Image (cartoon, rainbow, N blue to C red):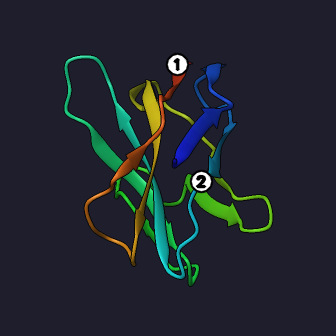
Amino acid sequence: QVQLVESGGGSVQSGGSLRLSCAASGYTYSTACMGWFRQAPGKEREGVAAIDSDGRTLYADSVKGRFIISQDNAKNTLYLQMNSLKPEDTAMYYCAARAGYCPGDFRYWGQGTQVTVSS
C-alpha cells in the first residue's frame, strides 16, 4: 500500500523559509512523478511543483524562483524548499505521486501539512 507522509510545515514570518518533506513507501515504479499541491481556505487546490524520475521539474508561476522541489531516491523522500515566503503561500500543502512522467493525474496523496505565513 502506497503511503505518503508530509512533515515540515509550520508558522513563519513573511520572507522566511521552510522545507517540507514527504516520505514515500509502498511503491516502486521505473518512472514516477511526485508533486506538491496546496489548498488555502475557500480556494481550489493548485499544483505547486512536480518532479519526475529523470529529475525534470515543473513549477507554478507563483512560486518560480522561490521554491525548489527535489527528491532523494535513496531515502524515498520528496522535498520542497520554500524561500521568500509570502502570506499568500499560506495553505495546507499536500504531497502526491503517480506512475509515469509529469504532468498527469495523481493517484496517491498524503494527509497534508499546514504552512502559515504571517505578514
Alpha carbon distance from label 1 to label 2: 30 Å
Q: Residues within 10 Å of mark 1 (few under 14, many from 20)?
A: some
Q: Amino acid at mark 1?
A: Thr
Q: Give the image location of residue 25, x and y in percent.
A: 63, 51
Tally the marks. 2
As helix, strand or loop, the secondary structure at mark 2 comes to: loop
The residue lying toward the viewer, choosing from 40 and 77, is 77
Q: Give the image location of residue 17, x and y in percent.
A: 68, 36
The residue lying toward the viewer, choosing from 111 and 25, is 25
Q: Give the image location of residue 110, x and y in percent.
A: 48, 37
Among the two numbered marks 1 and 2 on one chain, the one whose residue lies closer to the N terminus: 2
Residue furthest to the front: 1
As helix, strand or loop, the secondary structure at mark 1 comes to: strand
11 left or right of 44? right
- Residue 26 circle label: 2
Q: Amino acid at mark 2?
A: Gly
- Residue 116 circle label: 1
Above or below 51: residue 44: above
107 left or right of 6? left
Of badges 1 and 2, the one in the foreground is: 2
46 left or right of 24? left
Q: Give the image location of residue 5, x and y in percent.
A: 60, 36
Above or below 78: residue 28: below
Which residue is found at the position 80% from the left and 67% from the top? Answer: 74
Which residue is found at the position 58% from the left and 25% from the top? Answer: 14
Which residue is found at the position 62% from the left and 26% from the top? Answer: 9
